[in-house]
Image: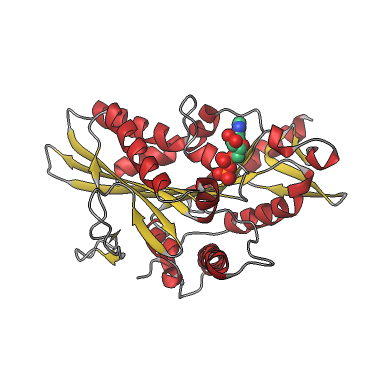
C-alpha cells in the first residue's frame, strides 16, 4: 500500500510537470442522483471512484467496466468551493496577463450550469471567479492600477448575441486586434466595468434576464446554446508604467448529446446541425492541436474562433467534463469521458498560434 501511494505521488508530480508545460487540464465532476432521474435500475449509479486515486473514474457501461484517468475527479459529494479551489490558481493567472479558458462539457442535465453559474445560495465558478479577481486586484492596488471588465454573450445557431447590450442588436463579428497582440475582440460587444461586488451581481442578473426573455423554453434554449462570460483584466504598474492584459473565458457549452439523431426537421434540425458543428469544430481544433498539425481550424465555428486566443501555447485551458451518474445516461457518459481523455493529451505548443 505504501509503495502504491509512493507511485501515485510520483505520478502526481509528473502530471504537475506536464501541466506546467501547457497541456489542457481536464477534471470530471459527477453530479448527484436527483429526483428527475426517477427510480429503479435505470436510475442507479454506474459511476465509481478509486479511494486511492482521485484522478481515476470507473464507469460500468452495458455491464462492462471502463476506467478513465484525468487530472482530477470530483464525486457527487464535492462542494462548489471544492471545485473552485481546484481552478482558482488558473483564474488568478489572468491578473498576470495570461489568457485562461475554462469550459464545462457534457450532456444536458449533467451539471454544466450548476458548476459554472450555480445557484443564488451556492454560486458556481463564474461568480466566485469575479469575486476572487476583484479582491486580488484590490490587494495589489498600492502598486498596480487594474480595471476588470466583463462581457456576457451566447452563441446560438452560429450567431453571437450580446447579453449586456441595451441597444438593439447589431450583427456581432469577431476580429483580430489591430495592435498585433494576437488578441481577439468583438466590435460592438458591451464591456461592463466591474467596480464592486454589487456590480458583479447586477451584471449576472442583467445577462440572465436578457437571455431568458427572448425564448419561451429556456431549458431547451440553454441546452442548445453556448453561454460565455468573458472577463478582461487590464493592469498598469504605477512605477514602471508596464501594462498587462489577461482574459478569462468561462464557457457553459451546449449539451454534447447527439441531438437530431432522428425526426428533427426545420428549425430543430438547423439547431442540431449548428450545435453539432460547433462542438465538432471544438473537437477538430483539439485534434489538430493534439497532433501538432500546422493548421488549426479555429475559424470553422464562432465558438472556436472566439476562443482562439485562449487555446494557444501561452494560454491556460481547463475543461470540466460533467458526468451524470445514472445508467440510462451511460452511453453519453462514455462519449464524454472518451472526449475528456483525448482533450487531456493535448499540448498547447507554440505551433498552435494561428490567425
Ligand atoms: P446542464 O447545465 O448540464 O444541463 P444542470 O446544471 O442544469 O445541467 O444540472 C441538472 C440538474 O442537476 C439541476 O437541477 C442542478 O441543480 C442539479 N445538479 C447538477 N449538479 C449538481 C451538484 N453538483 N449538486 C447538486 N445538484 C446538482
Q: At x 25% / y 56%, what residue is drawn?
A: 168
How many numbered discs sit on the rendered protein?
Answer: 0
Instruction: Tell me if I can see residue 73 in this picture.
Output: yes
Q: Nearer the viewer, residue 346 or 175?
A: 175
Q: Residue furthest bottom?
A: 294
Q: Residue furthest front?
A: 216
Percent x, y of residue 199: 27, 32
Q: Residue furthest right?
A: 63
Q: Nearer the viewer, residue 115 or 21?
A: 115
The quarter of the picture where the N terminus appears is: top right
Depicted 338 relative to depicted 121: above or below: below
Percent x, y of residue 145: 17, 36
Left or right of 303 in this view: 29: right
Percent x, y of residue 80: 53, 30
Left or right of 296 in this view: 256: right
The quadrant holding residue 204 is top left
Q: At x 63% / y 61%, what residue is drawn?
A: 259
Percent x, y of residue 155: 42, 58
Q: How is the image coloured?
A: secondary structure
Ligand 1: image quarter: top right
Left or right of 265 in this view: 97: left
Depicted 220 relative to depicted 56: above or below: below
Q: Nearer the viewer, residue 268 or 101?
A: 268
The quadrant holding residue 149 is top left
Depicted 163 relative to depicted 283: above or below: above
The quarter of the picture where the C terminus appears is: bottom left
Instruction: Tell me if I can see residue 249 in this picture.
Output: no
Amino acid at each position: 500500500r505504501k509503495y502504491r501511494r509512493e507511485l501515485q505521488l510520483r505520478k502526481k508530480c509528473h502530471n504537475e510537470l506536464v501541466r506546467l508545460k501547457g497541456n489542457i487540464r481536464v477534471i470530471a465532476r459527477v453530479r448527484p442522483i436527483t429526483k428527475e432521474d426517477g427510480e429503479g435500475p435505470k436510475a442507479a449509479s454506474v459511476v465509481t471512484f478509486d479511494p486511492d486515486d482521485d484522478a481515476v473514474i470507473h464507469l460500468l457501461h452495458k455491464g462492462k467496466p471502463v476506467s478513465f484517468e484525468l487530472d482530477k475527479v470530483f464525486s457527487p459529494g464535492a462542494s462548489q468551493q471544492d471545485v473552485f479551489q481546484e481552478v482558482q490558481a488558473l483564474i488568478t493567472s489572468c491578473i498576470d496577463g495570461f489568457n485562461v479558458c475554462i469550459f464545462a462539457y457534457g450532456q444536458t442535465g449533467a451539471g454544466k450550469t450548476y458548476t459554472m453559474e450555480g445557484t443564488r445560495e451556492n454560486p458556481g465558478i463564474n461568480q466566485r471567479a469575479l469575486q476572487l479577481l476583484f479582491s486580488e486586484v484590490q490587494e495589489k492596488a498600492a502598486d498596480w492600477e487594474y480595471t476588470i471588465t466583463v462581457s456576457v454573450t451566447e452563441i446560438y445557431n452560429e450567431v453571437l448575441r450580446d447579453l449586456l447590450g441595451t441597444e438593439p442588436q447589431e450583427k456581432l463579428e469577431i476580429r483580430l486586434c489591430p495592435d498585433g497582440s494576437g488578441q481577439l475582440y468583438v466590435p460592438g460587444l458591451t464591456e461592463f466595468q466591474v467596480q464592486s461586488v454589487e456590480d458583479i451581481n447586477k451584471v449576472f442578473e442583467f445577462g440572465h434576464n436578457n437571455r431568458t426573455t427572448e425564448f419561451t423554453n429556456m431549458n431547451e434554449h440553454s441546452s442548445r446554446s453556448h453561454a460565455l462570460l468573458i472577463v478582461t483584466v487590464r493592469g498598469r504598474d504605477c512605477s514602471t508604467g508596464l501594462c498587462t492584459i489577461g482574459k478569462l473565458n468561462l464557457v457553459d457549452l451546449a449539451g454534447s448529446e447527439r441531438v437530431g439523431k432522428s425526426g428533427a426537421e426545420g428549425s430543430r434540425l438547423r439547431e442540431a446541425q449548428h450545435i453539432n458543428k460547433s462542438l465538432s469544430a471544438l473537437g477538430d481544433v483539439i485534434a489538430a492541436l493534439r497532433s501538432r498539425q500546422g493548421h488549426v481550424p479555429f475559424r470553422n465555428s464562432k465558438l472556436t474562433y472566439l476562443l482562439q486566443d485562449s487555446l494557444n501555447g501561452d494560454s491556460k485551458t481547463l475543461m470540466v467534463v460533467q458526468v451524470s451518474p445514472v445508467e440510462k445516461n451511460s452511453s453519453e457518459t462514455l462519449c464524454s469521458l472518451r472526449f475528456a481523455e483525448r482533450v487531456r493529451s493535448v499540448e498547447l505548443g507554440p505551433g498552435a498560434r494561428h490567425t
